[in-house]
Amino acid sequence: MIQRLSSVSLTFYSLVILVLLMGTGVFLNLSHSHAFTRMNEIPILTWITTTWPTAPALVIWFFLLCLVATILFVNALCCSLDRQLSLARRSARTKNWLFFILHCLFILVLICHGLILVTGEKQGKIGLAPGQSHWFGPYEILVSEVVFMDDKNILTVPKNEQRQLMTRKNIHIHENYAFLTLLKNKEILASKKVRMLSPLRYRSVQITLIEFVVLEPDNPAGSDDHPSDKALGVIITLTHDFLSRFFFLVYGVMILALAGFTAMTWKRPDTKKGEIV
């Protein structure tokens, strides 16, 4: 039984089905983009219960994806214990032991990824303007300043047009930021100029800037003002998961081990065969 579960053919078919399911996910995203966005904004169990009544096909797709990933996990575990470990013990070669370690790290990554899906807390689409704050469990997130150096008219157009305008020429992510402060019991834990793709991290808490927004003025008479006169705000996503730091650590070690294994097993071309005598 273990030999069947550790077979290379099971690995191949699992990977093929996994790729097909991920491709199906891209297709489903075209008609259910909102549901896919919510998957990254709320806990996965909440997403399943709220999505099932409106889009059961998405939930079935997600369960199939998890099932295939579980089969791949069992396959990697059995392969490591049944084949890679025994091969490393018999040969005692460094590359065989490194290959076994690679399998173990891959298994750890799969375990952490699966646990992260069902553990921790997550809140998405939190809109805040300068001077406003939001409570996330025992933590308070305060926005002190929002700076957007590019054309603010881009933020006021419909989303479909906005995506087309979000180019490197129009948006300079390193110049646009929100200054955020993380507090607990009125004590400052961390503060940072948070940019796109550059979140604020403090232990297991992460604050990610999703987008900049133009807020409507409180005074209705000013609703026709130029967009540059309106207040700027940000949309953030909050996550709290004790496994996230360990996951990225293991993932980084796995990449380094893979690079070391590749360098160790890399075969240089035999230049002598190409010489003309």
Image (cartoon, helix red, strand yellow):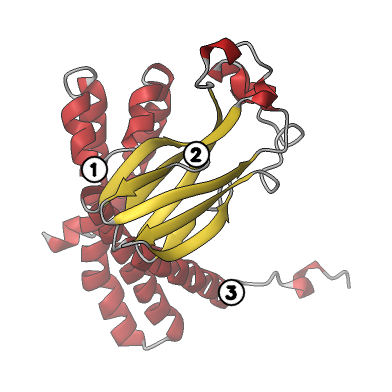
Badge 2 or badge 1: first in the primary sequence: 1
Determine which of the numbered discs, if any, sits on residue 66 in the image.
1
Determine which of the numbered discs, if any, sits on residue 263 in the image.
3
Q: Label 2 near label 3: C-beta < 8 Å? A: no
Asked whether residue 249 appears in the rendered view, the answer is: yes
Q: Residue at x 32, y 35 (%)?
A: 39
Q: CA distance from mark 3 to mark 2?
A: 38 Å
Badge 1 or badge 3: first in the primary sequence: 1
Query: Which one is closest to the eye, mark 3 or mark 2?
Result: 2
Q: Label 3 near label 1: C-beta < 8 Å? A: no
Q: Residue at x 74, y 31 (%)?
A: 170
For badge 1, the amino acid type reads Cys
Q: Residue at x 30, y 73 (%)?
A: 84
The C terminus appears in which quarter of the rendering? bottom right
Q: Is the residue marked by circle 2 packed among few (<14), some (14-19), or many (20+) residues within 10 Å?
A: some
Relative to 97, is 262 on the left or the right?
Answer: right
**Along the viewing direction, whichever of 29 and 139 lies nearer the viewer:** 139
**Along the viewing direction, whichever of 125 and 56 lies nearer the viewer:** 125
Q: Compared with residue 219, is residue 209 higher up or lower down, i.e. above or below?
A: below
Q: CA distance from mark 1 to mark 3?
A: 33 Å
Element type at mark 3: helix
The N terminus appears in which quarter of the rendering? bottom left
What residue would you read off at disc 2?
A: 210
